[in-house]
Amino acid sequence: MLLYRAYGGEMTRYYMQRTIFDETIQERVRQDIKFGEQSYKLAPHDMTNEECKNLRKLAQEECEKNAKDGTLSWADIILEEFYEACAETNIELQYKELLQMHAVTLHALEDLKYKIEQKIEVN
């Protein structure tokens, strides 16, 4: 089992992810209670597939540029994955792209949780 950074065996990556999943389920329950059942289109109703593809291209370019100059952020990667999903017309491919976005978001949550535990300030 992979150890999560400097936890020195106190917290495994699995335990960190399990904690985040539990918190996510609690939040989903809270949302269900507040908003009820929800089902929407992935992209805004007034956005064409061509516009989604353009946003995907811009997000990919921004991600690549920021990776090269050392300013890449979780937001860059998450937005790239989201716009990739929006640009897809096949629902199974949209699902796959959102799953990738979910995995990146999980990684971002792990990173933030680590920083919280280590009392590392973020801006």
Image: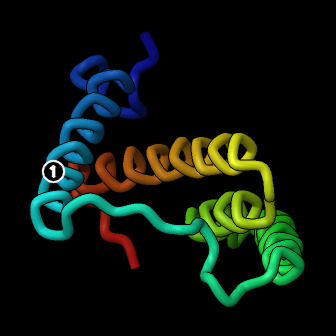
Which residue is painted at 65% across and 63% down in the image?
82
**Relative to residue 5, is residue 86 depicted above or below?**
below
Q: x%, y% of residue 94?
A: 69, 50
Determine the secondary structure under disc 1.
Answer: helix
Residue holding disc 1: 29
Q: Please tell me whether residue 29 is drawn above or below residue 62 in the rendered image.
A: above
Q: Quadrant of the C terminus?
A: bottom left
Residue at x-position 15% and y-position 47% = 26
* Residue that lies at the very extreme toward the top in this rendered image: 1
Q: Is residue 69 visible?
A: no
The residue positioned 22% from the left and 22% from the top of the image is 10
Residue type at mark 1?
Answer: Val
- Location of residue 48 with respect to 88 vertically, above or below: below
Using residue 45 as the reference point, say whether residue 115 is left or right of it: left
Q: Nearer the viewer, residue 30 or 48?
A: 48
Q: Is residue 118 left or right of residue 58?
A: left
State left or right for residue 2 relative to residue 60.
left
User: What x and y, as percent, mark residue 74?
Assistant: 57, 63
Q: Nearer the viewer, residue 73 or 24?
A: 24
Q: Nearer the viewer, residue 43 or 102?
A: 43
**Image location of residue 19, percent across then percent down:** 22, 35
Q: Quadrant of residue 18?
A: top left
Count of number-bearing discs: 1
Coloring applied to the structure? rainbow
At 60% from the left and 50% from the top, the residue drawn is 98
Single out the residue that lies furthest toward the bottom: 46
| Quadrant location, the N terminus | top left
Q: Quadrant of residue 76?
A: bottom right
